[in-house]
Amino acid sequence: MSHTFTFDDYPKSKDDLIKLPEINLDSPFKTAALTVLVLLNYKDNVDKTIEMLNVLKGPQALSNQEISFLKDRIKEKWYVVPSFFEGSNPENDYKYNLPLKITIHEDKYTYNQKGYAKLLIQSSGADSKRPIVLREKDNKWYLWENMLLSDIRKPASLNVW
């Protein structure tokens, strides 16, 4: 099963994020979609992005190690996050369509561990879907582990061939 989410734009602040209907976090699909959506803001404002991710993390804020990991991955590989949205591909330098559309997938292993959901998201620059793990607490699903930022094919503008 898969769920597709559509957003007019990405949130620029915690106030923008909490206005989105998906913020009720009542399904792991919503939290996964919001995580990638929020990461689009990283290039504009790191601190506000971390603040929004902490909302999605729930009772456990991002660790210094997770913040450092984001910096290392997104700074040099700015194109990874946009690659999860409809319309993006290496040939167009991962420019996504507006409104933003993202599809979140489950498979037979999604709910193997009680209280956790491992969902998958397809990057237009990768052959296989990337995982993201959400954790349930008090009937809400929170970001637990983000494994979406693995390297992908370079955008055309960076490909020397």
Image (cartoon, grey):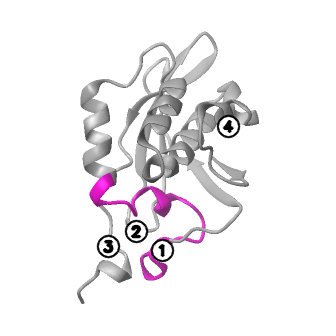
Residue contact between numbered discs 2 and 3, judged by CB atoms under 8 Å: yes
Numbered mark located on residue 20 in the image = none
Residue at numbered disc 2: 125
- Which residue ends up furthest to the top in the rendered image? 138
> Whole-Å distance between the Cαs marked 2 and 1?
6 Å
Residue at numbered disc 3: 154
Indicate the position of residue 3 as horizontal and vertical percent values: 66, 47
The answer to whether 80 is drawn above or below residue 44 in the figure is below
For the magenta stretch, what is the residue range? 75-94
Residue contact between numbered discs 1 and 4, judged by CB atoms under 8 Å: no
Q: Residue, x 53% and y 32% (percent of image)?
A: 52
Residue at numbered disc 1: 89
Residue at numbered disc 4: 16
> Whole-Å distance between the Cαs marked 2 and 4?
29 Å
Indicate the position of residue 40 as horizontal and vertical percent values: 51, 51
Residue contact between numbered discs 4 and 3, judged by CB atoms under 8 Å: no
> Whole-Å distance between the Cαs marked 1 and 3?
10 Å
First-in-chain label (2 vs 3): 2
Q: Please tell me whether mark 2 sits on a helix, a strand or a loop.
A: loop
First-in-chain label (4 vs 3): 4
- The amino acid on which the numbered mark 1 sits, given as a three-letter code, is Asn
- Which residue ends up furthest to the bottom in the rendered image? 161
Q: Please tell me whether mark 4 sits on a helix, a strand or a loop.
A: helix
- Judge whether residue 106 can be spotted in this image: no
- Judge whether residue 123 can be spotted in this image: yes
- The amino acid on which the numbered mark 2 sits, given as a three-letter code, is Gly
Q: Residue, x 65% and y 35% (percent of image)?
A: 17
- The amino acid on which the numbered mark 4 sits, given as a three-letter code, is Asp
Residue contact between numbered discs 2 and 1, judged by CB atoms under 8 Å: yes
- The amino acid on which the numbered mark 3 sits, given as a three-letter code, is Lys
